[in-house]
């Protein structure tokens, strides 16, 4: 259930950060939206910290729940691997993938959340790009992207079957269909994620000499450039 | 494909695991038997032919030869299945047969599923509770809706062959895990009005990591079940009830 929250958050998150693909102004607008400007009339980056804190909390609870299930000893791990190697079965093998990606996420997602928690104001078309390129976060984001999309895709599929969301009266489910949807979702978000990361890297690279400078939307520069009226 | 004339069938190479744990001189190894495939041949027929014509010492279990007793479960090219329900025509020429894992090995392909099933049944108390109090044999039994009887019968079709346990990664890792067979039985008794047990009683039995909350939803069970039982759906159902009970 914590997994469901994290998957939904992650999907919304991906759509939001991918706003950079629509241009710097679009991403700037999203940034100000999450800093609460339309509601409070001014930018409150602490709101970003608050979201990061909630996600971190759910993330920790999720890890606690998941840790019960991963092989607790080498003997258990070996028993599972032996079973997996002799029994060709996709859903069994995908679980091992979830264990591995989940383990990777424990470190990478924690680092990302810590950054967002303590530096909530460093989000924006230039701020994010500088973090990605000049701040050398892109290798982490690249690995994190693959880990999170694979983990989430398999996870939501398993969740749907685990609780029988689409089961008929007798408990039969359309597994073939659910498998197709699962892979389509993973492929879609991986593509979107890679394009988005590439966009931030490009902007960050081009902006590397002015790293730290903040983005000012074209509409506002025009305003400031205008000579004062009499 | 098999030919209607038996003589022209494929030459099958059946690799059978040979090992007798009771014999100190025995070491596990694969022994290969070559037999001619006949029309409509099942693995049970193939094994019987091997035993009758090539080696009388090959051990494997069977009773009914019709997928009802659940004795002839074995690993068939990596997949758990019933020998009597598997046509050789559905397999390549090379067929590797191993005993079902998890269960105690008796010899060669013969395993003691009974011991495991009994242990599970005793822990989960897979029988109708409360039927023996105040029984009046002269009275008519309480009626049951045909739909309900049908639903119970659907789950009652389990033959305890052990294929779901052999296909379960969790059962491989955790000795006490009750497997799909155990949870299917709990779902079956939960439906049965003759069983007095409440969800709270069932929670004590399967509301733990040896039961529904230990299941990793790997779905091996439902993919190999020779009786096509809707195991994943039944476990999902039981999980929802048990979560409700826990809250």
Image (tube, rainbow, N blue to C red):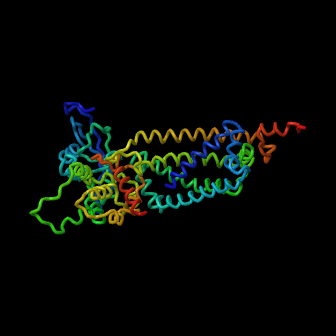
Direction from residue A127 to residue A112 in the image, left or right: left
Q: Position of residue B200 (x, y in %)?
A: 35, 65
Residue that sits furthest to the bottom in the current view: B134
Vertical placement of residue B48 versus B172, above or below: above
Direction from residue A174 to residue A226 in the image, left or right: right
Q: Nearer the viewer, residue A191 or B205?
A: B205
Q: Residue at x 32, y 40 (%)?
A: B94
Asked if one can make out residue B230 in the rendered structure from this viewpoint, the answer is yes
Q: Nearer the viewer, residue B223 or B20?
A: B223
Asked if one can make out residue B58 in the rendered structure from this viewpoint, the answer is no
Vertical placement of residue B216 versus A179, above or below: below
Q: Position of residue A57 (x, y in %)?
A: 58, 59
Q: Nearer the viewer, residue B117 or A195?
A: A195
Q: Position of residue B232 (x, y in %)?
A: 36, 50
Q: Position of residue B167 (x, y in %)?
A: 36, 51
Q: Residue at x 73, y 49 (%)?
A: A41
Direction from residue B41 to residue B199 in the image, left or right: right
Direction from residue B56 to residue A41 in the image, left or right: right
In the rendered image, which quarter contains the C terminus of chain A? top right
Residue that sits furthest to the front in the current view: A230
Q: Nearer the viewer, residue A190 or B63?
A: A190
Tell me how many marks there are: 0
Residue that sits furthest to the left in the current view: B138
The quarter of the displayed image where residue A177 is located: top left
């Amino acid at each position: 259930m914590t997994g469901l929250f994290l998957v939904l958050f992650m999907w919304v998150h991906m759509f939001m950060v991918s706003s950079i693909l629509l241009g710097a102004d679009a991403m700037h607008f999203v940034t100000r939206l999450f800093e609460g400007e339309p509601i409070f009339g001014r930018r409150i980056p602490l709101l970003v910290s608050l979201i990061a804190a909630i996600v971190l909390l759910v993330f920790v609870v999720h890890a606690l729940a998941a840790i019960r299930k991963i092989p607790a000893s080498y003997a258990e791990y070996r028993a599972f691997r032996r079973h997996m190697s002799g029994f060709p079965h996709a859903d069994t093998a995908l679980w091992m993938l979830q264990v591995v990606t989940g383990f990777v996420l424990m470190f990478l997602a924690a680092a990302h959340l810590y950054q967002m928690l303590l530096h909530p104001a460093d989000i924006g078309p230039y701020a994010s790009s500088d973090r990605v390129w000049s701040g050398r976060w892109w290798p982490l984001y690249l690995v994190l992207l693959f880990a999170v999309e694979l983990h989430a895709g398999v996870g939501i599929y398993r969740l749907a079957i685990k609780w029988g969301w689409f089961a008929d009266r007798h408990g039969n489910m359309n597994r073939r269909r659910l498998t197709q949807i699962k892979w389509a979702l993973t492929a879609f978000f991986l593509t979107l994620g890679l394009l988005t990361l590439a966009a931030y890297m490009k902007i960050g690279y081009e902006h590397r000499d002015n790293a730290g400078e903040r983005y000012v939307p074209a509409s506002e520069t025009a305003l400031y450039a205008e000579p004062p009226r009499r | 494909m098999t030919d209607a004339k038996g003589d022209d069938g494929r030459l099958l190479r059946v690799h059978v695991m040979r090992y007798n744990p009771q014999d100190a001189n025995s070491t596990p190894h694969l022994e290969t038997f070559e037999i001619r495939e006949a029309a409509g041949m099942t693995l049970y027929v193939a094994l019987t032919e091997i035993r009758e014509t090539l080696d009388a010492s090959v051990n494997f279990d069977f009773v009914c030869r019709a997928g009802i007793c659940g004795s002839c479960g074995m690993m068939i090219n990596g997949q758990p299945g019933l020998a009597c329900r598997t046509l050789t025509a559905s397999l390549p020429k090379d067929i590797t047969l191993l005993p079902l894992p998890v269960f105690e090995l008796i010899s060669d392909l013969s395993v003691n599923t009974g011991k495991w099933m009994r242990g599970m049944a005793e822990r989960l108390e897979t029988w109708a509770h409360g039927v023996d109090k105040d029984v009046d044999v002269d009275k008519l039994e309480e009626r049951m809706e045909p739909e309900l009887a049908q639903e119970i019968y659907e789950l009652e079709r389990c033959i305890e062959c052990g294929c779901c346990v052999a296909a379960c990664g969790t059962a491989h890792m955790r000795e006490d895990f009750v497997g799909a067979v155990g949870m299917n039985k709990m779902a079956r008794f939960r439906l049965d009005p003759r069983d007095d047990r409440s969800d709270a009683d069932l929670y004590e039995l399967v509301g733990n990591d040896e039961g529904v909350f230990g299941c990793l939803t790997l779905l091996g069970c439902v993919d190999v079940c020779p009786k096509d039982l809707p195991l994943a759906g039944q476990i999902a159902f039981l999980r929802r009830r048990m979560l409700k009970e826990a809250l």
